[in-house]
């Protein structure tokens, strides 16, 4: 199995910053995509940012210019630097990793437990 451990959430005032981290561990042959999703109360989970093997990042329009996704391949860790936070960024943030556990294996998608981000106005 693959485990994802997230950290870095919390309460911050509007305009502030937070940095989320997500470390993957367990049997992993290769990581295909690392991403961050979020889910606000009463809303569907949405993709915030992703970074595939190519390193080409992608962002939701609502966070472009404010959030930055990055990774440390050796540490199997993905980060989300969130600047200029707004109250509408309040949500539970989930880390997602698509990986292969063996060279012959299928791609599998794993999720972190979620970390709460609350932005006060």
Image (cartoon, rainbow, N blue to C red):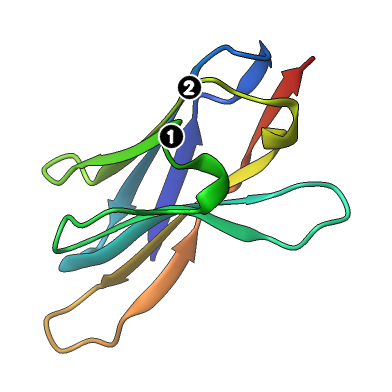
* Residue 2 lies in quadrant: bottom left
Q: Give SS at disc 1.
A: strand
**What residue do we see at 67% from left, 35% from top?**
89
Name the residue beneath numbered marker 2. Answer: 83
Crowd class of label 2 (few under 14; some 14 to 19; many from 20; radius 10 Å): some
Task: Using the image as rendered, state which of residue 94 and residue 75 is in the foreground.
Answer: 94
Q: Mark 1 — residue?
A: 67
Cα–Cα gap, marks 2 and 1: 6 Å
Identified at 51% across, 41% down, the residue is 63
Residue 4 horizontal/vertical position (percent): 43, 49
Q: Quadrant of residue 19?
A: top left
Say left or right for 67 vs 27: right
Asked whether the viewer can see residue 94, the reply is no
Residue 32, label in figure: none
Residue 33 image point, x, y percent: 30, 64
Horizontal arrangement in the rendering, residue 4 relative to residue 75 (left or right): right
102 with respect to 26 (left or right) = left
């Amino acid at each position: 199995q693959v485990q994802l451990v997230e950290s870095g959430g919390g309460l911050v005032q509007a305009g502030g910053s937070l940095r989320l981290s997500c470390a993957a561990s367990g049997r992993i042959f290769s990581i295909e995509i690392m991403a961050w999703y979020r889910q606000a109360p009463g809303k569907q989970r949405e993709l915030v940012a992703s970074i595939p093997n190519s390193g080409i990042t992608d962002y939701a329009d609502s966070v472009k210019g404010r959030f930055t996704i990055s990774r440390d391949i050796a540490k199997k860790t993905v980060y989300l630097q969130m600047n200029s936070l707004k109250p509408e960024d309040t949500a539970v943030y989930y880390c997602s990793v698509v990986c292969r556990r063996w060279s012959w294996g299928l791609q599998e998608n794993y999720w972190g437990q979620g970390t709460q981000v609350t932005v006060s106005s």
